[in-house]
């Protein structure tokens, strides 16, 4: 990443270690602000391209704060590109985040360079999803929920869902790695659009997700 | 293109977003139909125009605005931005006022030379979609009807004036009807959404109760182990087994936290075990690896008992290989079923070191525990690996009742 312009990110995390550590640990990121919760972030409105958002923001206080998919929705509605950075692995919750308008999801267990790459991707307008969600995208496609996918996009998605590298997919389909990853970008955009446009209850039914976690919160206000 | 994609879908989603998409399609569709009608009539219209150049200039401006509005609403997948609503209304008004510049008085009603009327009806429909408040819709209709009458009435013959008044009324009629329909659809979608959420909440509540029961079971097992450790002075001969049990419990807790729903269900009913449960059980022993299991596509596949045991052991061996050799940061266990081919397929892939299958002799695990053991059950094994690009092992077996048994060992070689 050295030599390339660094991505300007703002971190919202109740964990002091993460807030202060990102600056030191991830050279690819220019951490312009680190906030404890969404309210603090919206008060500061830093000049950031990407917002790194932790899903659990209980902090040390006892007052309820905006968190989870609701926090994603509040930031997305305000026009921010949200990259969820979390330990949360339940698919239903991750789907709810994309439904609420998140542009990407990275697990805290991933190596740090993955976070830097994901932030760069989100800053460039691409969607970033986890392996589990790639599997879910394939499921959605196979159940006829993503009719806009081209045959090539389906091929690449099937490979990625099976853990195949772009290098291997490219060789198998006689295309370049860049083309393969371009197809996957299209797939992710279409999948994210599908998730945004369907209600959590629809998604639960269509994708066979466990209900808990998706709808145990109040429905968001419809956009004006 | 997105709009076309939206229409080609089997059905628009019955959600508020779907209603907006539908409204976009109707608004853009009415405009497109009117313009297409005009395109067909245009040779005659141009012949009768007093100034074909002016006609084309106004038409060009109108087309440009239509394309801009179309691009915006299709991109947003909704026509809710009031600013564009006013822009479209004002443009339509301007187009109507410009009609006398290129039409003879006798052509201003009932002729495609004065194309403004037919084309701007879609603006009235659009106003009903884009504006929420009635007075805004009324204002837009007033602008449209006012501009139309201002351009048509002066110098019109008696019959033409009556036609013009009737036409002006059509703006209001279209807007009222469109508003009725879209308002109703929006309320309907809202109600459907609420009903769905209600049902989902009830299901969530049931799931929560099940969840609590599972937590109780999990925590119950931990108590005795924790007690023994807390008491201190564990007898030496118990130390090893106790540690092993503590580690197993720790892994179970972690797996539980990762995805409670993915925990292998306790299958009390007799019969062949589901492939999905077999794989989850196999993965459950390797929770220290960064494993992601995507197995939903094989939902419903059941394997006869001996084959199920062999698959579980084989996937376990493959994951053990990954643990020892691969140094992987991502491991995927994927399952799929293809009823047309009569086959199920399981893939175990990692992004680790990889090896050269041609140059590296297969270890005991892969050769005996995976390939030979599975061949006995008619399951083919295909190993694909490239140094530096991970390893992918695919198992393929016949669906019970499937049309054909494939060869025991896949002849295909890694490319």
Image (tube, coloured by chain):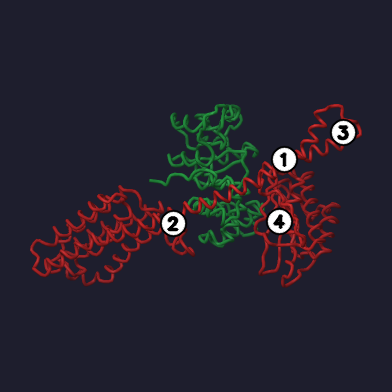
Judge whether residue B69 can be spotted in this image.
yes
Whether the residues at callouts 3 and 4 have beta carbons within 8 Å, the answer is: no
Whether the residues at callouts 4 and 1 have beta carbons within 8 Å, the answer is: no
- Left or right side of B179 for B96: left
Tags 2 and 4 both on a single chain? yes
Few, some or many C-alpha atoms within 10 Å of disc 4 (few <14, some 14-19, many ≥20)? many
Name the residue tied to disc 2: B18
Count of all numbered marks drawn on residues in the image: 4
- First in residue order: circle 2 vs circle 4: 2
Q: Quadrant of residue B392?
A: bottom right
Few, some or many C-alpha atoms within 10 Å of disc 2 (few <14, some 14-19, many ≥20)? many
Considering the numbered disc 1 on the image, is that residue within a helix, a strand or a loop? helix
| Residue B110 locus on image (x, y percent) | 18, 70
Q: Quadrant of residue B150?
A: bottom left
Judge whether residue B16 can be spotted in this image.
no
In the image, residue B244 sits, relative to residue B97, either above or below, namely above
| Residue A120 locus on image (x, y percent) | 53, 40
Considering the numbered disc 2 on the image, is that residue within a helix, a strand or a loop? helix
- First in residue order: circle 3 vs circle 4: 3
Name the residue tied to disc 4: B276
Mark carried by residue B375: none
Mark 3–mark 2 Cα distance, whole angstroms, equals: 62 Å
Considering the numbered disc 3 on the image, is that residue within a helix, a strand or a loop? helix
Which chain is depicted red?
B
> Which residue appears at 84% of the width and 36% of the height?
B242
Mark carried by residue B253: 1
Q: Which chain does the residue under circle 4 lie in?
A: B
Q: Which chain does the residue under circle 1 lie in?
A: B
Colour chain A appears in: green
């Amino acid at each position: 990443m050295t030599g390339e312009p660094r991505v300007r990110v703002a971190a919202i995390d109740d964990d002091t270690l993460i807030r202060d550590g990102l600056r030191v640990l991830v050279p690819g990121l220019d951490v312009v602000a680190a906030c404890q919760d969404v309210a603090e972030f919206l008060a500061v409105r830093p000049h950031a391209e990407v917002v790194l958002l932790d899903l659990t923001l209980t902090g040390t206080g006892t007052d309820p704060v905006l968190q989870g998919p609701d926090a994603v929705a509040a930031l997305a509605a305000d026009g921010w590109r949200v990259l969820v950075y979390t330990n949360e692995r339940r698919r239903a919750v991750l789907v709810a985040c994309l439904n609420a308008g998140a542009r990407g999801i990275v697990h805290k267990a991933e190596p740090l360079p993955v976070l830097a790459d994901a932030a760069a991707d989100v800053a460039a307008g691409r969607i970033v999803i986890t392996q589990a969600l790639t599997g879910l995208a394939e499921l959605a496609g196979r159940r006829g929920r993503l009719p806009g996918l081209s045959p090539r996009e389906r091929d690449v998605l099937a490979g990625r869902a099976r853990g195949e590298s772009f290098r291997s997919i490219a060789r198998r389909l006689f295309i370049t790695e860049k083309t393969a990853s371009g197809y996957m970008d299209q797939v992710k955009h279409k999948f994210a659009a599908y998730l945004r446009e369907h209600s959590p209850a629809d998604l639960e039914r269509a994708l066979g997700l466990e209900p808990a976690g998706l709808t145990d919160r109040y429905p968001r206000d419809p956009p004006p | 293109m997105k709009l076309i994609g939206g229409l080609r879908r089997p059905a628009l989603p019955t959600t508020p977003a779907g209603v907006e998409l539908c409204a976009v399609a109707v608004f853009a569709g009415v405009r497109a139909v009117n313009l297409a009608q005009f395109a067909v009539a245009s040779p005659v219209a141009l012949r009768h125009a007093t100034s074909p150049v002016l006609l084309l200039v106004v038409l060009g401006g109108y087309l440009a605005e239509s394309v801009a509005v179309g691009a915006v609403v299709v991109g947003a997948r909704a026509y809710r931005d009031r600013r564009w609503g006013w822009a479209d209304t004002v443009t339509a008004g301007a187009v109507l006022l410009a009609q006398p510049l290129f039409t003879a008085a006798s052509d201003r009603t009932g002729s495609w030379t004065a194309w403004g009327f037919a084309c701007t009806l879609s603006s009235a429909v659009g106003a009903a979609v884009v504006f929420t408040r009635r007075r805004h819709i009324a204002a837009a209709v007033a602008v449209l009807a006012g501009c139309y009458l201002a351009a048509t009435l002066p110098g019109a013959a008696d019959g033409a004036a009556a036609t013009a008044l009737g036409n002006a009324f059509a703006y209001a009629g279209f807007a009222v009807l469109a508003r009725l329909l879209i308002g109703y659809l929006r309320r309907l979608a809202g109600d459907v959404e609420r009903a769905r959420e209600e049902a989902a909440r009830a299901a969530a509540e049931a799931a929560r109760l099940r969840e609590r029961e599972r937590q109780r079971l999990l925590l119950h097992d931990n108590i005795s182990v924790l007690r023994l450790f807390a008491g201190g002075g564990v007898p030496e001969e118990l130390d090893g087994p106790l540690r092993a049990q503590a580690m197993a419990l720790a892994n179970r807790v972690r797996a539980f936290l990762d995805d409670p729903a993915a925990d292998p269900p306790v299958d009390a009913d007799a019969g062949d075990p589901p492939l999905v449960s077999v794989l989850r059980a196999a993965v459950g022993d390797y929770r220290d690896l960064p494993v992601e299991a995507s197995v939903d596509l094989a939902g419903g596949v059941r394997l006869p008992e001996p084959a199920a045991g062999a698959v579980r052991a084989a996937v376990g061996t493959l994951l053990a290989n990954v643990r020892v050799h691969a140094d992987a940061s991502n491991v995927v266990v994927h399952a799929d079923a293809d009823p047309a081919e009569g086959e199920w397929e399981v893939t175990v892939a990692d992004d680790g070191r990889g090896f050269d299958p041609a140059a590296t002799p297969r270890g005991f695990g892969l050769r005996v525990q995976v390939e030979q053991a599975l061949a006995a059950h008619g399951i083919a094994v295909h190993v694909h690996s490239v140094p530096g690009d991970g390893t992918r092992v695919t198992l393929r077996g016949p669906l019970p009742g499937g049309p054909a048994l494939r060869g025991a060992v896949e002849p295909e070689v890694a490319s």
